[in-house]
Image (cartoon, rainbow, N blue to C red):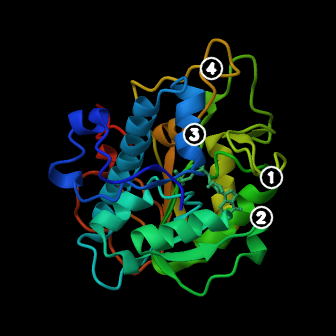
């Protein structure tokens, strides 16, 4: 298996940032050579600088998992042995590696349309793998999950499959389950462009070199569009937007001259959405009146997203 980075290599930048000691010392840092997220950082953001790209890659994965952990803790309290997590559209495990460090890998499933990425994560992190499909109705999965994380997929879906994937994923949840996904909000629409009345703007361009552009491009959405899509997919569910900040985020080499092209991470930073079928307010996670489980008294949800993760 060809790797871009191998655990134990001890890159000086990573060592300087403390990645070889303390809480994250045990995280598996193997990165597959085909991992497009690392390539995206290296060639679209850091001008080829491998060290900076590795830092961005690992640090963004850590932040996403930290945000998700806070949400899980807030919602479920301590994670028990029967808890099941799905990292959907997990790529090659930028985030999964941190999940697998904190939770027993046998409680984690990953799914991606890239079968090689799925196999890599099974072999490297010991998680369960599912190979996904372009068409949500063709994705088969018999497992039901307490929580599903989708970082940086809805930021790329056309309107035609946005709702379909929401519906498919919401149906994979346990009755008291929670789905967290990122979007590019209205505030990230490139200058000179605007959202159409439908509330969704789709461009046939992305960081992916492998997926058809009509299937996987770049998507910006209005909050109303997302709320309508959730309501249509699961009328009994409810949704909460977590606006978040990543003040230091910067992209160069973008196609938008005065403002960075949206990146999946930027999207996650700006608009993590949580939907669940159990109501809790405040904070405003929405849910089914029939929901039987009460969210635990964890940290305030407002501290999730990227606020707590910002440097
Ligand atoms: C921007 S990457 C994000 C990867 C990972 N979630 C992360 O945050 O590093 C988007 C991922 O979505 C995957 N993907 C695209 N279409 C998919 C589909 N229909 N089902 C599952 N995964 C899909 C791609 O293969 C890619 O790995």
Distance from the alpha carbon under mark 1 to that under mark 3: 20 Å
> Is residue 1 placed above or below 257 in the rendered structure?
below
Instruction: Specify whether 12 is left or right of 290.
Output: left
Judged by depth in the image, the label closer to the viewer, 3 or 2, is 3
Instruction: Specify whether 5 is left or right of 204.
Output: left
Q: Is the residue at mark 2 in contact range of ligand 1, meaning its CB lies under 8 Å from it?
A: yes
Q: Residue at x 29, y 61 (%)?
A: 74
Judged by depth in the image, the label closer to the viewer, 2 or 4, is 4
Nearer-N-terminus badge (4/3): 3
Q: Quadrant of the C terminus?
A: top left
Q: Which residue is mark 1?
A: 215
Q: Secondary structure at mark 3?
A: helix
Image coordinates of residue 259 in percent, x first then y, are 61, 17
| Foreground of the two, 153 or 132 | 132
Displayed quadrant of residue 218: top right
> Is residue 257 placed above or below 311 in the rendered structure?
above
Displayed quadrant of residue 131: bottom right
> Is residue 167 placed above or below 161 in the rendered structure?
below
Q: Which residue is mark 2?
A: 134
Distance from the alpha carbon under mark 2 to that under mark 4: 29 Å
Residue 13: numbered disc: none
Q: Are marks 3 and 2 in contact (CB under 8 Å)?
A: no
Q: Is the residue at mark 1 in contact range of ligand 1, meaning its CB lies under 8 Å from it?
A: yes
| Foreground of the two, 175 or 96 | 96
Distance from the alpha carbon under mark 3 to that under mark 2: 23 Å
Q: Are marks 1 and 2 in contact (CB under 8 Å)?
A: yes
Q: Which residue is mark 4?
A: 253
């Amino acid at each position: 298996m060809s790797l871009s980075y191998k655990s134990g290599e001890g890159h000086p930048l990573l060592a300087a940032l403390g990645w070889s000691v303390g809480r994250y010392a045990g995280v598996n840092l193997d990165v597959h050579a085909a991992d497009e997220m690392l390539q995206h950082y290296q060639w679209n953001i850091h001008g080829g600088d491998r060290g900076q790209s590795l830092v961005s890659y690992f640090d963004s994965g850590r932040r996403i998992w930290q945000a998700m952990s806070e949400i899980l803790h807030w919602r479920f309290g301590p994670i028990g042995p029967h808890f099941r997590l799905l990292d959907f559209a997990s790529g090659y495990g930028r985030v999964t590696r941190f999940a697998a460090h904190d939770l027993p890998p046998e409680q984690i499933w990953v799914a991606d349309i890239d079968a090689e990425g799925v196999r890599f994560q099974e072999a490297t992190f010991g998680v369960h793998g599912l190979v996904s499909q372009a068409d949500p109705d063709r994705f088969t999965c018999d497992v039901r999950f307490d929580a599903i994380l989708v970082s940086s997929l809805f930021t790329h879906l056309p309107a035609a499959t946005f709702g379909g994937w929401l519906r498919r994923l919401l149906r994979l949840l346990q009755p008291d389950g929670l789905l967290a996904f990122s979007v590019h909000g209205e505030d990230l629409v490139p200058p000179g462009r605007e959202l159409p009345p439908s509330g969704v703007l789709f461009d046939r361009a992305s960081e992916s070199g492998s997926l058809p552009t009509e299937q996987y491009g770049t998507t910006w959405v209005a909050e109303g569009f997302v709320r309508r899509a959730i309501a249509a997919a699961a009328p009994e569910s409810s949704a909460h937007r977590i606006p978040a900040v990543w003040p230091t985020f910067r992209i160069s080499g973008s196609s938008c001259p005065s403002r960075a092209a949206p990146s999946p991470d930027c999207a996650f930073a700006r608009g993590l959405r949580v939907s669940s079928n159990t109501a809790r307010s405040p904070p405003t996670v929405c849910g089914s009146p029939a929901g039987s489980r009460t969210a635990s008294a964890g940290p305030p949800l407002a501290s999730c997203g990227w606020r707590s993760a910002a440097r």
